[in-house]
Each structure stands twice: as C-alpha cells, then as structure tokens.
Image (spheres, rainbow, N blue to C red):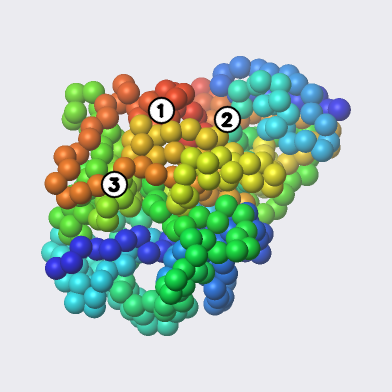
Amino acid sequence: MARVMRLGRVELKVLDLEKSVEYYTKIIGLEETGRLGDSVYLKAWDEYDHHSLILTKSNTAGIAHFAFKVETLDDLAYYEKKIEQFGCATSRISYGTRLAEGEAVHFILPTGHHGELYHEVEFLGTAVGTLNPHPWPLGKKGIAPHRLDHCLLTGDDLKSVTRFFIEALNFRQSERITSVDGEELLGTFLFTSNKAHDLAFVKGPDAKLHHAAFYVDSLHEVFKAADLLSMYEVPFDVTPTRHGITRGETIYFFDPSGNRNEAFANGYITYADFPTITWTEDKIGQGIFYHRRELSESFMKALT
Amino acid sequence: MYKVKLHARGQLFEYSCSSTVTPLQAARNQFIPIPTGCKQGGCGMCKIKVLEGEYSQEVIRSHEALSDAEVENGYALACCMVPKSDLHIITAEDYAKKEKVEI
C-alpha cells in the first residue's frame, strides 16, 4: 500500500469567528474558500485542495481534529483496517458532514486527539495554476505561506502514540527527545512524506495543541513574516531563530484565540532509511531554540 | 495610575498600571515575572484571583482558560482586563498553593 500522503487539514477551535477569519486571511494570508454553519474553510495559495484549515467557532480554543490525506480509496480502507488492528476504534465521517469533503475515517489517538484519514476532497487548484505557472501569484496578502506544514500536539503516552503512527500508519520517526538515560520519551517527531516532521508530540497534557505551522520559503520570508506580525501587533511567542530539531527556521506567535502558529522554513528532507536522531533532555534548550539554548515558560506551558 | 499588588511565584510585587493597560502588560513592562502565555484569553497561563479592586474584562475568552464559575468567583485573565481601581491580585497558581497550606 502507498504511504499516507500528507497532513491535509487541521480544524482549529476559535473564540471569535470573524476576528479569526480576518487574522487568517489578512495577516497569515490564506484564502477563504467556503463557509458552512459555524465553520470557515481556508487554503494557502500553493495548495490544490479545497481547504487545509477549518476555523470553527467554539467557547474554547485548541484543535478539533487533524487529518491526513491518502492516495486512493483502497488506501483509506487499508489504513482503516490497520488502525482497527492496532486497537483504536474507527468510525466513518459521512460525506457532506463538512464542506467539499468526502468520507473520512475517524480515530482517537492514545493522546486523546481526534484524527482522520481521507481521500476525497474537492480540487480547487493553486493560485498560479498548472500551465506555465508563475513562481508566486500577484497580489499576495500577509505572510502568504505555501501550505500548512505540520502540527505539534501534547500528550502523556508518547511511546504509544509513536507506535500508533509507525505500526498503523507506516510513519517513521525523524527525531526524538529522551531523558538522559534514554528511558523516557519526551518528544517524538514523525513523518510520512519527505519532510522533517508532519506531526510531532511533546510530553504534556493530553488532547492539547502546541502549534499549527505554515510553510514559508526561506529565512528571509520568516523575517518578513515577523515584520508583518509586528505591524499588525500580533503577540509573539518566539522571534526569528533556528531549531536544532529539524534545523528549521522559525517564529512562533498566537492567533486571536491563543492558538500558537508557526511560520516555518526549510528543515532537512527525510528518507525512509534515515536513522532517528536523538536529543537528550539536558540539550533540549538548544534542540528547540538553537541560539538561545534555553526553553521559555510560555513556549512550554501555553497550550490550547 | 492605579496601584497593583501582585502575589506571584511566592513573592509580592507592587507596581503601577494605567486604566488602558492590562495588569499583565504593566507587570511585564516593569520586569515583574508574571506567568505569560498567549495574551489572547486562550491559554489561561495568566489566570489570577482578584482579592480586592474593580476591573473590567473581555467576555470573549476560552472557557477552558476561565470558566463562568471562575468569573463568578473573582478569577480573571490578567491579559484580558484593565483596572478601574487599585488592585490586589494573586496568580491562580499561588492562590491554589496558599489555599492548600491554609487547609
């Protein structure tokens, strides 16, 4: 069976829908592609599918679900069975539950997060098209990332959640954070594509979101994103720096509901035969913030 | 300018705060180590108990960060409020510890 393709969408809970739509369209620079009920659907300019982000009005912040796209309906049935065999219950989200989506396979992770797999979603195309395309569209707004990149979630049982993604969904682990003696798993970075991570977990309370990240091209674009955030007075968590883990260049900031966002650039590419990189807890400061070499309280504790 | 007395991290801090600035930002501006997260009413890291004083607060916030019952019991988010008088406040963390000791 083919590998699971990519992180296709994330649904975030937001407190003030219109304020959030304004932030994600004007400042992040995503395009609104539709509305249904209390949800607004958005995509980045370089994405083909109908949406990669759903904002749903709620009285709490955080992540409602994440979903990975598979290549065919056969893959969907195959991985559905693999999830069941692993010991996680699945159910089908029926066609038309959300806008522009077909059926999805729903499951709950050992960390309490709601995940889905899907194949069918309406095709919209990128802003530059597929025939003699320009490298980027005129009239981009805000940060204008290429795509949704990855999520970092928190949970208690990181060993089980890692096993779930490796055994049931055929993911691989690019990096991990362990206690100095190697006994305890404190962070796990997982990929199914060639990215340094598609989904990651760090030790913390179950079912919480640490951040949702959007991909930009370069350190220069990270810096420009940071400039924009200051122009719009968006609260920062972390100003431009580099990660030891993934080697990505990064900024962290908060959406109007306190959900942490990241503008992430570069990072190495992965292959199936790469060994897992290990960071020990005593070096975690530079693993996460390579220059500062210390964690910050807000980065560790502010979760939604 | 109002006076704020803040109990945080087991210490007492006194600082001034205008009626247009949150007690969170005023503390940070004066290098007072108040627990700070998203500053958007989403994460609840700056949850405080107001022991004394008047204030107005933003009603839109995460109910996981600050529930209706907590609002009724005088809790607030230091990032989502402004003072309307002198304030005497304590971080939710310090208040929980204090209650434990007193029990």
Residue A60: % across, % down: 54, 55
Residue at mark 2 to residue at mark 1: CA–CA distance:
23 Å
Residue A269 is labelled as 3
Residue B35 is labelled as 2
Q: Is residue A269 above or below residue A244?
A: below
Label 1 is found on which chain of the structure? A
**Image position of A78 (left or right of A230):** left
Q: Is residue A205 visible?
A: no
Q: Is residue A130 above or below residue A226?
A: below
Residue A9 is labelled as none
Q: Secondary structure at mark 2?
A: loop
Discs 2 and 1 carry the same chain letter: no
Q: Nearer the viewer, residue A286 or A11?
A: A286
Q: Residue at x 50, y 65 (%)?
A: A134
Residue at image mark 1: A290
**Image position of A4 (left or right of B96):** left
Q: Nearer the viewer, residue A109 or B84?
A: A109
